[in-house]
Amino acid sequence: MTLAIIGAGIIGTAIARELSRYELDILLLEKEPEACMGTSKANSAILHGGFDAIPGTLKARLNVRGNALYHQFAKELSIPLENIGSLVLTRDCDDQDRLVELKERGEINGVKGLEIWDRQTLEQREPELSESVCSALYSPSAGIICPFQATFAFLENAMENGVTFLPDTKLLAVHKRDGKYLLNTDNGEFLVDSLINAAGVDAGHVASMLGDEIEIIPRKGQYRVLDKGEREKYHHVLFGLPEEHSKGVLVVPTVHGNVLLGPTSEVMEDRHDLSTDVEGIDFVDSAVRKLIKEPSIARTIRLFSGVRASTPGGDFRIEESENSPGCIHVAGIDSPGLTAAPAIAEYVAEILLKKILLREKEHVVTTRRGTTTVHNMRAEERHLRIQQDKEAGEILCRCEMVTLAEVKEAIRRPGGARTVGGVKRRVRPGSGRCQGGFCESRILKVLQEELALQDEEVQKEGRGSWMMRRRDD
């Protein structure tokens, strides 16, 4: 049986990994040059506890399960994860009832260890909070994660177990043919028995190709990234009280040592609009000042935005196609989609297993070796590594201390980097305060050499983002 998954973000790759345990021929199609190019590369990088979701919804069930699975996968697949906990802050003591309500909701959802902290406790545990904050809901199971490494880990492990990854393969149309589905793409045609729609903000468009209607509401979130050094000020993920369509503006320490401030929640007509603007960032700054003492805005090194796919009902839509038997939609995966991803993959497998008799493989690889990071090694290890490979001592990115050996490894790994941004997300050159001012040209050169690319073939991010143009004669 041949199955196609559309979209190689965190959801598509998690599904590919889960299904790679079975005797299936799996094609993972991605319209961009590589994986992790949509919502998965631009989000809050949080593992949610699960107290906010309405009991009985898919979000409630899959959030709590996904959180638990990540703690297992972090070890097996070398995914950076820190269980630092989260705080939902109130500035008005009359809002204490809302914290109690969230706590009770979380307990119904199966979230363990929820506590309400008073001002005195907060001053001891999180001293940089605004003086107007009076209490908070503490969730110990919440944490922070690298969404890039999670996506690449799922992808690499899926490929190790036989999944075929097809980047630069945009789905154009789906035709039914003798009980199967002919996928027409800009990279050829593929005949499959089943299709899983994990296309993120494009899931509604893919659903229409299968004769179904799924309304996707694109919501843009704008963020600030603060330089390293700010992280030591904050010990938890900090939320305000959740709003109707979002969890509000956050202060997020990251696993890499930066701090994220944001996001906004703006309904967009253009589902691919990744612009930032003064109004959005001003909104973030104003909201953050209600949570913490004066944020170090001057230490901003980057602004960015991402678009998440919401639905009118507010819950995930994971369901069989009404008009195309054997096809499954995985749509409306906004927050807490990153947290829920491995549980969503399990849920999709359950749907398939009810319809199709699948046989598990006799041998499945369940682990993945992480990327070698030279600057995190002890001095003796680093010295030995450089003796073994002189490229491990050649620094390409001074801000993040990334070596030539690490960049080459990022390109050579299964489903490896094909763009400057792809290298950045894997091993972080260009993620520091100069944002690639020193290293970008060096990364470009390595990509050319490793992939045999001409000058005009190197891309910064997605399709058409050429780094250089050949001057007309």
Image (tube, rainbow, N blue to C red):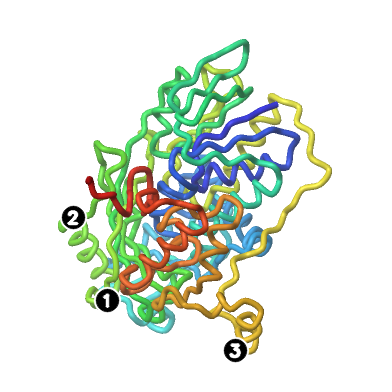
SS label for mark 1: helix
Q: Nearer the viewer, mark 3 or mark 1?
A: 3
Q: Position of residue 390 (x, y in %)?
A: 58, 78
Residue ranking furthest to the right: 362
SS label for mark 2: loop
For image coordinates 66% across by 79% down, the residue present is 388
The residue to which callout 1 is attached is 299
Q: Position of residue 441 (x, y in %)?
A: 36, 65
Residue type of the residue flagged with mark 2 = Asp
Q: Is residue 119 above or below residue 458?
A: below
Q: 407 or 341: nearer the eye?
A: 407
Residue type of the residue flagged with mark 1 = Arg
Q: Crowdedness of circle 1 by 10 Å Cα count: few (<14), some, many (20+)? A: some
The residue to which callout 2 is attached is 277
- Horizontal arrangement in the rendering, residue 288 relative to residue 238 (left or right): left
Q: CA distance from mark 3 to mark 1?
A: 30 Å
Q: CA distance from mark 2 to mark 1?
A: 18 Å
| Quarter that holds the N terminus | top right
Q: Nearer the viewer, mark 2 or mark 3?
A: 3
Q: Position of residue 21 (x, y in %)?
A: 73, 42
Q: Which numbered disc, 3 or 1, marks the residue that appears first in the sequence? A: 1
Q: CA distance from mark 2 to mark 3?
A: 44 Å
SS label for mark 3: helix
Q: Which numbered disc, 2 or 1, marks the residue that appears first in the sequence? A: 2
What is the quadrant of residue 434 in the picture? bottom left
Which label belongs to residue 379?
Answer: 3
For image coordinates 32% across by 56% down, the residue present is 248
For image coordinates 54% across by 64% down, the residue present is 408
Residue ranking furthest to the front: 473
Residue ranking furthest to the top: 178
Residue type of the residue flagged with mark 3 = Ala
